[in-house]
Image: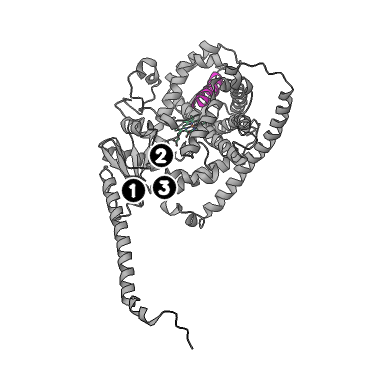
Amino acid sequence: MAVQIIPEHLYDLIPSRLTVIFSLASLICFTVGSALFRRYKFMKECNKVPGPPAQIPLFGSFTELFVDADQLLPHCTNLYYKWNKNSMLRVWIGPLPWFILGAAESAEVVLSSNKIIDKSGEYDFLHPWLATGLLTSTGSKWHQRRKMLTPTFHFKILEDFVHVFNEQSKILVEKLSKEVGQDFDIFPFITLCTLDVICETAMGRHVNAQSKSDSDYVRAVYSLSRIVQLRQIRPWLRPDWLFNLFPYASEQQQGLSILHGFTDQMIRERKIEHKLRKAQKETEAKTVTKDDEFVSKKRNLAFLDLLIEASQDGKALSDLDIREEVDTFMFEGHDTTAAAINWSLFLLGNNPEVQEQVSEELIRVFGNSDRPVTMADLNELKYLECCIKEALRIYPSVPLFARQLMEDTTICGYDLPSGATLMAVPYIIHRDPTYFPEPDRFRPERFFPENIRGRHPYAYVPFSAGPRNCIGQKFAMMEEKVILASVLRRFHVKALDKPENLPILAELILRPRDGIRVHLTNKKST
Ligand code: HEM
């Protein structure tokens, strides 16, 4: 006999099957309808910003940036000039709207804000590698870390790195001297040099990348950068579950084990050294004044040592926290400077009259000696500095960077919805003829003090600007100056390609697709 669970008098209260189906259908219709309505409103707001129309209703355009990698920047620049009305362009990357900030005016609103500091979803693809270090973190974590790391870029600490820049430049010059008289690609030589510099300054280790012809580390950096870039612009590679179906996933895994394995080993080694140093220090008398305490205690240390000290034996920073910051320095600190030095050489190699002026300055400062560059020299190399700045204007190492709106915000008269991605593009911003007439011409005098005066402060942003600007910009300028001065004291550089014919890849870093082909002549023998 079946057990009667529901009393008979309640049967009438049970909805009929039809009612259930109807209610469910209504609920689904309501949910889908309101989602579509929200989406429609979102797209309507976004579409108020001028830009190419979405090709697929509700989903935007899958093909807008589906161009060859070396066409991405020219394509974006053309789109910007075709549609731009108010310093901004809207592009649909699949269902996601990107707002391209291509002028000082729109860049200022975003970069100067203390609220718009969240990185966009595009940075999530860096997380497997950099986790949430300073570049990729947000909110209170970012605030705390920025505060903790700022003193490590103190002028006095950077001063100690000048000898590293000199040592590695010397090796570079020796290597380049073997190429004198031949046509060759200088890009890998510079990259290995900046890699040696960052390994020594960030981790306190010689990796001798310049002496080895091929570096696993550099290969892994390139492979990961390419994969991150692809995931940013190919919507089908975005979700992890889809990405994992492609061979890129195993390539990424291999790259990560090289990069993380390397950093982990460095952390282990430096922690042991740190313990020994600490024990030794405890036996020494402490005679420093409070003001000098931070700087004087930390001289001759690598960034990693400073992080280990700041970690308070794991209480403030775990080993993983340290790794994410060291990886961030390694990533941000070597490829960016390598690209910047290469682009400077490329432009100087295309503009012999400018290179001549640099040579005259170098003779004025160093005479014919080959002594190392000092801190005082760096302050004297004013024209070289203008050349570096102008090269970063034409070819910003970081060609674009992005923020995500966490609340509805009005920018340049447009009401942009929460969730939108704002993409600052220095490559376009730096070519605004209002601030830089004949923008494609290499004219270092644009950065003479009298010519900078009155220029919009956000017209030139190679290191970004505002609260999330580049923490390493002084380090980068010093390194660039030492390396370029060392190369140009010894060689005359002739570039073999013209800017108008050089294919450029806007990856995470702005790179020449086929390297920088040059011909060096020995100055001393001329
Ligand atoms: C020419 C060389 C360099 C250029 C052009 C450059 C450019 C930039 C730019 C544009 C940003 C902002 C990125 C964004 O908002 O997504 C940035 C951030 C950053 N850079 Fe650099 N950088 C250079 C060298 C360096 C060096 C040498 C280091 C370290 C040793 C470094 C460390 C960082 C870090 C940690 C951040 C994140 C800062 C934050 O969000 O608080 N950079 N850099």
> Given the image, on which type of amino acid does mark 3 rest?
Ile
Q: Indicate whether 163 appears above or below 315.
A: above
The circle on residue 92 is 1
Q: Specify whether tag 2 is near ligand 1 (CB below 8 Å).
A: yes
Q: Residues within 10 Å of mark 2 (few under 14, many from 20)?
A: many
Q: Nearer the viewer, mark 2 or mark 3?
A: 2
User: Is 75 rendered above or below residue 376?
Assistant: below
- Residue at position x 44%, y 22% in the image: 387
Q: Nearer the viewer, residue 16 or 209?
A: 16
Q: Would you identify the image quadrant in which residue 113 lies? A: top left
Quadrant of the image containing the C terminus: top right
Left/right placement of residue 480 relative to residue 199 reads: left
- The magenta stretch spans which residues? 473-491
First in sequence: mark 2 vs mark 3? 3
Q: Residue 34, position in %: x, y?
A: 30, 58
Q: Secondary structure at mark 3?
A: helix
Residue under circle 2?
402
For discs 2 and 1, the disc positioned in front in the rendered view: 2
Q: Badge 1: few (under 14), some or many (20 or more) residues near its Cα, within 10 Å?
A: many
Image location of residue 353, percent across then percent down? 42, 19
Identify which residue, 296 or 263, lies in the foreground: 296
